[in-house]
Image (tube, rainbow, N blue to C red):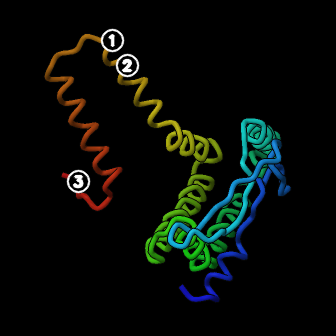
């Protein structure tokens, strides 16, 4: 990695939590060292966030939600497009930061950044096509899918079904999961 790219990556580091639009230290005041796994060299000391910090962030998000919800879909989409453009603009520096922090090859870091930038495009499309409820549904589906699946499995275990129906249901879930976890796999 070139020195210039490493300097760009280090310029992106923020060692505090972004809560309610402000960069703040952890409520506990604790910090944790982040080191380059290849060299052991210190990259930064960042806040060691705890439950109080998570609550403050959740409360700030809940407070901000009504204003975001009242923002027209076209305006939300413009904000999300700008977010995407900033990610793409800083792709190499972000990839270098991933490489520094995790020891991954730079190319893999670039792939992770591109994947993350894609999320902004997906959410933008949801915010313009079906309103904010779709964004909430998308985020909840992505975040809570494992919990939903566990609950569904528990309900299925308590419901008598024929072996054939259970086998087909299990096969369908495995097929879907293989496509979710291995996108290169073609649908059969």
| Residue at 83%, 43% in the rendered image | 27
**Label 1 crowd bin: few (<14), some (14–19), many (20+), radius 10 Å:** few
- Of 130 and 124, which appears nearest the observer? 124
Q: Position of residue 184 (x, y in %)?
A: 28, 62
Residue carrying label 1: 158
Q: Quadrant of residue 157?
A: top left
Q: Position of residue 161 (x, y in %)?
A: 22, 15
Q: Which mark is residue 187?
A: 3
In the rendered structure, the answer to whether residue 52 lies left or right of residue 133 reads right
Can residue 75 be seen from the camera position used here? yes
Disc nearer the start of the sequence (2/3): 2
Depth-wise, is mark 1 or mark 3 nearer the camera? 1
In the rendered structure, the answer to whether residue 5 lies left or right of residue 147 reads right
Residue carrying label 2: 154
Please, which residue is most extreme toward the front here? 40
Give the mark count. 3
């Amino acid at each position: 990695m070139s020195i210039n790219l490493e300097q760009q990556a280090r310029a992106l580091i923020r060692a505090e939590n972004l809560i309610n639009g402000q960069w703040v230290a952890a409520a506990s005041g604790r910090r944790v060292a982040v080191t380059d796994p290849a060299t052991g060299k210190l990259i930064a000391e960042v806040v060691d966030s705890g439950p109080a910090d998570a609550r403050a962030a959740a409360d700030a998000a809940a407070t901000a939600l009504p204003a975001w919800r009242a923002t027209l879909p076209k305006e939300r989409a413009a904000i999300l497009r700008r977010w995407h453009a900033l990610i793409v603009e800083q792709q190499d520096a972000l990839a270098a930061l991933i490489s520094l922090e995790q020891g991954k090859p730079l190319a893999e870091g670039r792939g992770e950044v591109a994947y993350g930038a894609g999320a902004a495009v997906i959410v933008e499309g949801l915010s313009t096509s079906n309103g904010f409820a779709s964004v909430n549904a998308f985020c909840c589906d992505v975040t809570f899918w494992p919990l939903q699946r566990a609950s569904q499995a528990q309900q299925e275990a308590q419901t008598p079904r024929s072996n054939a129906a259970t086998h087909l249901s299990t096969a369908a879930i495995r097929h879907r999961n293989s496509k979710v976890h291995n996108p290169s796999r073609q649908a059969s």
